[in-house]
Image: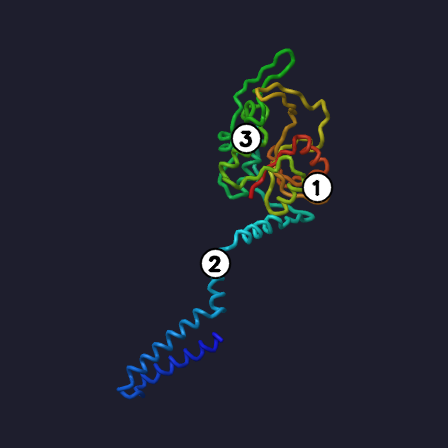
Amino acid sequence: MYNFLIFVTASASILLCFLLLLNKVPERFKKMVFSYAVVFFLLFCASVYLSPDVKHFTRQMTAKPDSRDIEEQAETKEDVPILKKEQALLNVPIISQLPELPRGCEVTSLAMLLQHAGINTGKMELAQLVKKNPTRYQRKNGQVYFGHPNSGFVGDMYNINNPGYGVYHKPIKELADSFLPDRVVDLTGKDFSELEKSVSNGIPVWIITNTWYSELPAEQFQTWDTPAGKVNITYRLHSVVITGYDQDYVYFNDPLTGEKNRKVPRQGFIDAWVQMGKQAITYL
């Protein structure tokens, strides 16, 4: 019905205007014809406005998104699984911690991660910026009293002859956050498959491991008293950047040897990482 009215009113209005333009209307009827043309034009506009099809289209164009639709879209986006490839290998800049930072594997590995993210920084800058634990080394009655590595870097990073140890993931994540606000992801405590998913998605992963890349025997550990409580530590502590994996091996950049995409047996590497507390960070 509305489509018919639109057609009739539009046709009548156009016809009358056409006659007026061609001067086919006698002078005494021009005002009347012009009035009819205006009336038909107004009827045409009303027919268009009242048309159900046009009103539906207008509502679609101007309506605000329903909050439920937004929530459903967000849930759908979050629920999309990140599939892990069978194998992956990334090109991550290799940086050696030596000779300047004999205990600087953690900040050197972080420098590799940040450079892969496009951040222009280096190991020496990060060594200055990383949070330090001010607790001094003491040994009384055979018991060591020193700092907790999750409270800041413990000891001397630059001189191996002075007491020192290293740093765990919390201060490293805090430092990474300052370069990549709202982009750093703490994977500590997750299953190793989550680390592989990150690598599969093109992003390397910073981790804490040991220099044997396998589970250490109990005699390689000792207990310290710290202001934050007791902590089990090993002087085999190490940090690397995971750059790849396959069915049999894990690949990583080793800041101690300066070797890029070094590979070690997969299960031993996972066991060492688990033993050191499943510490890992990456970025979005």
In this image, 214 relative to 5: left or right?
Answer: right
The residue indicated by pointer 1 is 249
Q: Quadrant of the C terminus?
A: top right
Q: Is the residue marked by circle 1 packed among few (<14), some (14-19), or many (20+) residues within 10 Å?
A: some
| First of labels 3, 2 by sequence position | 2
The residue indicated by pointer 2 is 63
Badge 1 vs badge 2, beta-carbon distance below 8 Å: no
| First of labels 1, 3 by sequence position | 3
Single out the residue that lies furthest toward the top: 141
SS for callout 1: strand
In this image, 274 relative to 29: left or right?
Answer: right
- Work out whether residue 247 can be spotted: yes
In this image, 35 relative to 196: left or right?
Answer: left
Between the residue at mark 1 and the residue at mark 3, the CA separation in whole angstroms equals 29 Å
The residue indicated by pointer 3 is 171
The amino acid type of the residue labelled 2 equals Ala
The amino acid type of the residue labelled 1 equals Tyr
